[in-house]
Image: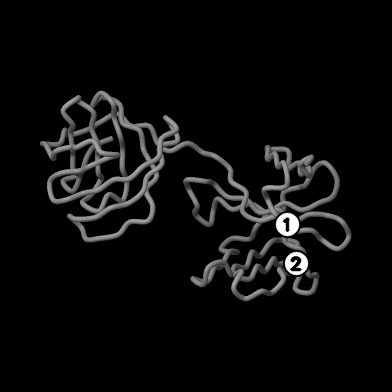
Amino acid sequence: MKLSKEALFFRAADGSCVLYTNSWGDSIFFSADGKKFFEVEGSGQSGSEDDHEFSFEDPHHNLKGKIRRKDDALKVNGKTYKKVRRPSKVAIVRLPRIRESKHLFLIPDGGYVYVSSDRFHDEYEEYKLFIGRGAKLRNVKIKKDGIDMLRDGGTMWIDTVEGRLHISAPSRREPATWKETIELQKLDLSLYEIVESKDGVEVKKREL
């Protein structure tokens, strides 16, 4: 990847490096040897452009922690990195594609409505909706620009070729609905084993 003039490069005494694609760290990469850089997920940023802190997750190496930037220095889980001259390009490995369960609902007829997205690429285009009974739920096509969300902690609408799913924010205490009138029961995802594949989704209640 070619680096822009906005990119910032930090190196520790042991040769490990951190790459910011810009001063805010909108995209962040870690490298143990300064040669291959692995993208990490940042969240919960607070502070200013050159004085901030946020959490990170590195799924490549199963690491989590905090990044603290103060001017030309970083601290990552206690290790200090100093700003140095950036290279013109680096070899990178992007965040992996991992499906993540978002919602599971029970339909009055005994079927399920299931919604998933990508864990590290949570754009609207990554959302999928599945519906069905028994061992396999089928994928229902979401219309183009068929997802809308409110910034209230959870309200969303998903328009599919078969109908609309409406989910209210938890604070509203309103049931989700399918096809405008069918009320759904929200299920606890932790109580179910869910396997998503190209052929559909399998939902099975965990044995207690």
Residue 187, label in figure: 1
Which residue appears at 18% of the width and 31% of the height? Answer: 12
- Give neighbour class at mark 2: few <14, some 14-19, many 20+ (Cα, 10 Å): many
Q: Earlier in the sequence, mark 2 or mark 1?
A: 2
Label 2 with label 1: CB-CB less than 8 Å: no
Which residue appears at 38% of the width and 32% of the height? Answer: 93
Element type at mark 2: strand
Q: CA distance from mark 2 to mark 1?
A: 15 Å
Residue toward you, 62 or 86: 62
Q: As displayed, is residue 34 above or below residue 21?
A: above
- Residue wearing tag 2: 178
Q: As displayed, is residue 159 above or below residue 189?
A: below
Which residue appears at 21% of the width and 51% of the height? Answer: 23
Residue toward you, 129 or 120: 120
Residue toward you, 189 or 77: 77
Element type at mark 1: loop
Residue 117, label in figure: none
Estimate the x, y position of residue 84 in percent, counting from the top left.
Answer: 11, 37
Q: Quadrant of residue 66?
A: top left
Estimate the x, y position of residue 100 in percent, counting from the top left.
Answer: 59, 46
Residue toward you, 107 or 130: 107
Could you tell me the amino acid type at mark 2? Trp
Estimate the x, y position of residue 162 in percent, counting from the top left.
Answer: 75, 62
Q: Is residue 175 left or right of residue 182?
A: left
- Please identify the quadrant where the C terminus is shown: top right
Total tally of numbered discs in the picture: 2
